[in-house]
Image (tube, rainbow, N blue to C red):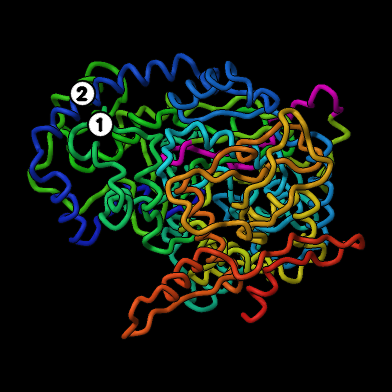
């Protein structure tokens, strides 16, 4: 989770610049009555919704075995519950043997590293590594890519949407390590280092200023401890949940307002809001303030892959993609008529929450509860009382090795990162594996690794991000979203054993290279793969060579790039299926962005007459000069040969 802003934890929200008052006034102007009526309906609906969530508990989390994702009945049941609650688990995505290899290689990798930025004390289990073997192998795994296609296909997608879910892209995010220390890496090591740093800082401060008053030191220490508690322990006095993919951007015209994502909510028609319609999200801007770790791509799910057993309690989610979202969007426009009672139960509390006690503000303030520039959206018990976070933030069931949990990008979540809390939970050994066989760190506890793996389709915006991320991967730098502000994250450039393009190709073949922007996306027609058959070798990554100008609205046959060696699945969602015109245009544009050296660009002159010859050259903008060669992996594990060298070699 994001580093805390201590002002988040006060009794009053943070006032924003005056322009946010104008933004709020513009959103409500002309439909004030509709908004007030919709607020009352929303509060009433939330009562029943909260009771439903609390009564179901973790059992409401739908799950489906990876082997059943092409089973119509299993797929329909999973889709129904996932859309209702906004989260789901795909079981057994990464085979146990592959997960074990990833953990073993990551343990060896981290044991060799001594220079890296330690996590903050309020989140000691989240490490700013981006290219460890566990992360690179998991993102590239063919079954992970197939699971991503599956869950993205469950949205209410339209043929005209400017995206291609058949091409999931890899997003370089962080990882979590619980339970054990691996060399100098681990929650215990992080806590010890933080304590030493604090002691050193205190000594330096005392030398510089003589001595600080005891009361001031105590207040500062209490504030830091409170911040860590609130983020890291669900038993704290105040619960805070986080919503990713922007905060203020959800209200701003240049953010999600660009596509009208939440227009129905702001017009008093939240019932018409469809959280599963991607049309208005593809063009939205989710990071206007260049925040640390703020995701700037369009992702359809946030997600994690468990490479070891994860017990309940680590992750809690608010399973309400529609009502809870509408609530925190409308909350800044309304205020209670009376002050909240001291006790959060009983008749007085019910009267405080009643719709009749709330009214639309006649003069809109600059406050947007839980939102400040450059940080994720926060939901709190104090500012969002109708959500009953202590009842609605539900823990997920046990994740076994290889399970993939995904949730809607608007869903609020809470991750327990307090190492003492995690240490108190004894991990449950998987049925076929003894606890002692799991790799252990220097403190003797099993290594527990969670890899952040969001599911994101290919779009123009995401292709532009891939071009930047590709360079950071090749150079061993943090992902672009995590170091664009000069935050001082350590580089993995000098780390011994850092995975390369060759490793990606060996794990996932051409589809994995495409996901990282290391190989062109397929658009050329190829013979369809017979149902139920699997190729013993990866499909070719030849791409734009076979494109013909003037496809018009016709579909284009798509080559199967979804199944790699050992994927264990039948024809994927991307294989042997027709490609819409919108998908083809997105794939072509992505190839132009990522591999510009393979295209003949036409730039019109000032006095261009628009001759037939010039028009032909304009058409060639979307067609390659020469067909790109498929990636080649040398037997001695040398460097994979792709067009990337030509595209990036001059930079």
In front: label 1 or label 2: 1
Location of residue 237 (image quadrant) = top left
Is residue 194 in view from this perspective?
A: no
Q: Quadrant of residue 110?
A: bottom right
Disc on res. 41: 2
Residue beneath disc 1: 270
Please name whichever residue, 231 or 521, is drawn nearer the observer in this view of the structure: 521
Give the overall secondary structure of the magenta segment: loop
In which image quadrant can residue 215 be found?
Answer: bottom left
Element type where label 1 sits in the image: helix
Q: Is residue 17 left or right of residue 515?
A: left
Which residue occupies the foreground of this view, 420 or 649? 649
Q: Which mark is residue 443?
A: none
Image quadrant for the C terminus? bottom right
Relative horizontal placement of residue 97, taking residue 253 as reference (left or right): right
Question: Residue 411 placed where, x, y %?
Answer: 44, 36
Percent position (x, y) of residue 92?
A: 72, 29
Residue span colored magenta: 408-434
- Circles 1 and 2, Cβ within 8 Å, touching? The answer is yes
Distance from Cα at disc 1 to Cα at disc 2: 9 Å
**In magenta stretch: residue 355:** no
**Residue 291 drawn at (x, y percent):** 44, 61
In the image, what residue occupies the spot 51% across and 79% down? 208
Judging from the image, what secondary structure is the residue with disc 2 in? helix
Against 344, is 512 above or below?
A: below
Near-viewer residue (188 or 212): 188
């Amino acid at each position: 989770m994001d580093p805390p802003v201590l002002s988040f934890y006060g009794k009053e929200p943070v006032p924003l610049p005056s322009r946010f008052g104008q933004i709020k006034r513009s959103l409500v102007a002309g439909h004030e009555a509709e908004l007030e009526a919709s607020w009352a309906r929303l509060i009433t609906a939330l009562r029943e919704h909260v009771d439903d969530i609390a009564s179901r508990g973790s059992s409401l989390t739908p799950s489906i075995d990876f082997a059943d994702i092409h089973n119509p009945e299993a797929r329909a049941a999973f889709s129904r519950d996932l859309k209702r609650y906004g989260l789901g688990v795909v079981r057994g995505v990464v085979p146990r043997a592959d997960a074990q290899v990833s953990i073993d290689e990551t343990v060896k990798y981290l044991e060799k590293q001594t220079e890296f930025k330690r996590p903050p004390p309020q989140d000691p289990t989240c490490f700013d590594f981006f290219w460890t073997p566990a992360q690179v192998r998991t993102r590239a795994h063919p079954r992970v890519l197939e699971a991503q296609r599956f869950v993205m296909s469950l949205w209410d997608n339209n043929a005209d949407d400017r995206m291609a879910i058949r091409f999931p892209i890899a997003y370089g995010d962080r990882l979590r390590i619980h339970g054990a220390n691996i060399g100098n890496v681990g929650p215990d090591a992080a806590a010890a280092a933080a304590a030493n740093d604090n002691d050193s800082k205190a000594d330096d401060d005392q030398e510089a200023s003589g001595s600080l008053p005891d009361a001031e030191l105590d207040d500062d220490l209490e504030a830091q401890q409170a911040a860590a508690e609130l983020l890291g322990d669900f038993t704290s006095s105040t619960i805070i949940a986080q919503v990713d993919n922007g905060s203020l951007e959800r209200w701003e015209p240049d953010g999600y307002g660009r596509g009208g994502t939440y227009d129905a909510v702001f017009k008093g028609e939240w019932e018409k809001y469809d959280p599963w319609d991607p049309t208005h999200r593809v063009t939205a801007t989710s990071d206007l303030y260049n925040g640390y770790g703020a995701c700037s791509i369009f992702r359809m799910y946030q997600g994690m892959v468990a490479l070891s057993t994860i017990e309940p309690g680590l992750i809690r989610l608010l399973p309400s993609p529609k009502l809870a979202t509408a609530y925190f969007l409308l909350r800044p426009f309304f205020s209670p008529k009376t002050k909240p009672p001291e006790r959060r139960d009983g008749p007085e509390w019910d009267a405080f929450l009643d719709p009749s006690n709330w009214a639309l503000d006649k003069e809109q303030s600059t406050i947007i509860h839980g939102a400040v520039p450059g940080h994720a959206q926060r939901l709190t018990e104090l500012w969002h009382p109708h959500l009953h976070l202590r009842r609605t933030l539900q823990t997920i069931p046990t994740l076994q090795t290889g399970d993939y949990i995904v949730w809607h990008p608007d869903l609020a979540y809470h991750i327990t990162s307090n190492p003492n809390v995690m240490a108190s939970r004894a991990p449950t050994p998987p049925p076929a594996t003894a606890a002692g066989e799991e790799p252990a760190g220097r403190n003797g506890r099993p290594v527990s690794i969670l890899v952040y793996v969001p599911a994101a389709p290919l779009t123009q915006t995401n292709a532009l991000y891939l071009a930047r991320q590709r360079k950071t991967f090749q150079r061993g730098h943090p992902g672009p979203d995590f170091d664009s502000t000069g935050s001082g994250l350590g580089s993995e450039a000098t780390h011994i054993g850092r995975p390369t393009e060759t490793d990606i190709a060996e794990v996932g073949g051409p589809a994995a290279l495409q996901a990282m922007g290391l190989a062109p996306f397929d658009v050329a027609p190829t013979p369809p793969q017979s149902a139920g058959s699997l190729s013993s070798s990866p499909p070719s990554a030849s791409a734009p060579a076979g494109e013909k100008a003037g496809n018009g609205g016709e579909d284009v046959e798509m080559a199967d790039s979804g199944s790699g060696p050992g994927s264990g699945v039948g024809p994927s969602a991307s294989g042997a299926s027709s490609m819409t015109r919108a998908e083809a245009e997105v794939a072509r544009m992505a190839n132009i962005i990522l591999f510009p050296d393979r295209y003949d660009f036409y730039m019109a002159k000032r006095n261009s007459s628009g001759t037939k010859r010039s028009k032909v050259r304009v058409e060639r903008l979307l067609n390659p000069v020469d067909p790109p060669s498929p990636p080649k992996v040398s037997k001695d594990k040398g460097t994979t040969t792709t067009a990337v060298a030509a595209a990036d070699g001059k930079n």
